[in-house]
Amino acid sequence: MNRIMEKRILFLWIGGMMAGTSLSMAQDNPATAEQYNESVTVTAPYQPSLGSVEKPVFSPSPMDTVLPAPGFDYEIISRPFATSYPVENIKPAKILGEPIPKLWNNSVKVGFGNHLSPLAELNFAMGRDRKYEVAASYRHHSAYGNIKGYDRFKTNHSLNEANVTGRIFADKFISSLDVIYSQRAVNCYGFGNWDTVPPGLDLGDFENQAKRWFQSARAILSFTDNARSVDDLQFDAKLDYNLNLNNFSKTASENTVLVEGGVAKVVLQDRRSVDVLQVGGRLRFEDNMFRDGINDGYWTAEQGDVGYDEDFIRGNGIHNAWHLNFEPTLCYKYDFVELNAALVFHVFGNSALNSYTGNQSWFQFNPVVDLKLHLIDKVLTFFIGTGGGVDRNTLDEISRINPFLHPTIFSDFKFTRDKFNAYVGLEGNITRNVDFRIKASAHFMENILSFDYYRYDWSYRFDYYGYNDFSPYYSGNVFNFRLRGDLNFHFGEKISAHVDATYNYYNDRLYYTPAFTANLAFKYNIVKGLSVYTDLRGYTNMKALDRQGNEQTLKGCADWSIGAEYRFIKRMTVFLDLNNILSQRYYMWYDYPSYRFNFMVGLTVDF
């Protein structure tokens, strides 16, 4: 029986060898290849892989309660449009063991401090939804205190801001609408050392003290597509409208309309070598119309009157400024090289419906090149490039820098031009907790914004010499060398810190522009629910002109603030902020001292 089995096994083995030989010959012979047809299916467990994606935050967030010092560090760079790297869709996978934490949709924050400073912040938002989102916020912050040496005058200021945001998350696009309202008011209190007040003039009843307020209503409609594959076009569009009103006169107003859009497409892609070539373009048009409103019943001087000035009393002139920007772009990535480039064309100008401001236009071309060399992946990157740009100085932007403005005329709103700049720098990570960035740049600029007193003598009509207010002041052609360094430190969720310092050299005198500024911020979460933080801001001396046109030096400052917050129950947090704890009396504007030591204590409720 065993011999019979052995013979059968030997016979089957010989037959298998002969069949394998004939199969091999059939595959090598095209004439007999069709005789063999086998379908093989290989199965394996599904293992999805997700890239690093940041969760977008659309809800409005409250602002800091610390008012920043003014700065005129221009960074006008036209950057090419570079969209994110497209990723093919994968089938959804059910993720287990990852509960979604509960989020509080609404919060109310109230506070109060010395100098009679109330604070109120309200934030409301709907819960999670895949199709749409709605959120709203409101903020009020004001102060009604007194400053030593300026007791005769009101030193009040107030801020009211409201924001409503809506988002639609469609299958192929994301659309959003933001409606923003802002109201800012200040009193011109810088009369403490006024040596030009006529003898016997009493300003103690505030009758002749100026008050400036600005309000703006803004709506921003944006649209962004969701590119589904590498072959799809990627595009975005935005419409921005801003209406500004002020108390210069009842008819003074400013309307700014901004239309912007871009399109891009990947024309070359190699996933194995991470080789990507993308081309695109952007188009931007901004139109700014300002009505000066000077002859509105307040300026009533007639020709022949004492003090009549034909250049000043012109009536409600409507002035217009526009800026067209077009830039074809290119983005290339390969291995450790990343290149962004664009040819940026600017056409801009002024026009008017009266004879005061003549129609004029300019053209500017800026080649934009940004080259990054990742010398050590995720550790050290060297970058070098060129740029430039044009920025319109609107009433809204200028008044946010310096709210103590004189009723300005159209000629005070010019274009700041960065005709050409070149930069070089390094960025990277020293350790996994520390990252840095160092950048040196050279700029050839024109019409850099600064401020000077508006000097006039209206004693013939008002029996005194005007208000303590400013008007925009612009430089000529200026060379600027700038050196900036940033350092960030993170240690889990316990400690976070940031340090930055900037040095500016100008070959011409610029007022209210310190040569060196620095900032230090530090936060330490001591235990769960309890954290302390500190902030130190400083700048060196800067030059200014007094009312007689004499040059003065405003001393630098170091404004140090500390604070703490403690979540004593799940939905309630108390906070304490101590500002300017060194009690320094510094001047951001000539004869306008800041508040010294001030504090605020309050409560935040989440629900």
Image (cartoon, helix red, strand yellow):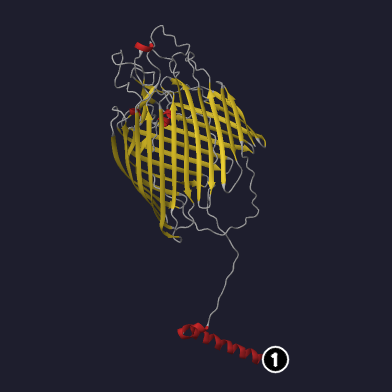
Residue bearing mark 1: 2
**Residue 603, located in which quarter of the rendered image?**
top right
Q: Position of residue 152 (x, y in %)?
A: 48, 13
Q: Is residue 21 above or below residue 213?
A: below
Q: Is residue 381 above or below residue 314?
A: below
Q: Nearer the viewer, residue 503 or 75?
A: 75
Q: Is residue 236 above or below residue 462?
A: below
**Residue 545, located in which quarter of the rendered image?**
top left
Visible residue check, residue 76: no
Relative to 277, is 525 on the left or the right?
right
Q: Is residue 265 above or below residue 39?
A: above
Relative to 350, is 168 on the left or the right?
right
- Dividing the image into 4 quarters, which one contains the N terminus? bottom right
Q: Nearer the viewer, residue 289 or 431?
A: 289
Q: Position of residue 554 (x, y in %)?
A: 40, 23
Visible residue check, residue 598: yes
Total count of labels? 1
Q: Position of residue 586 (x, y in %)?
A: 45, 23
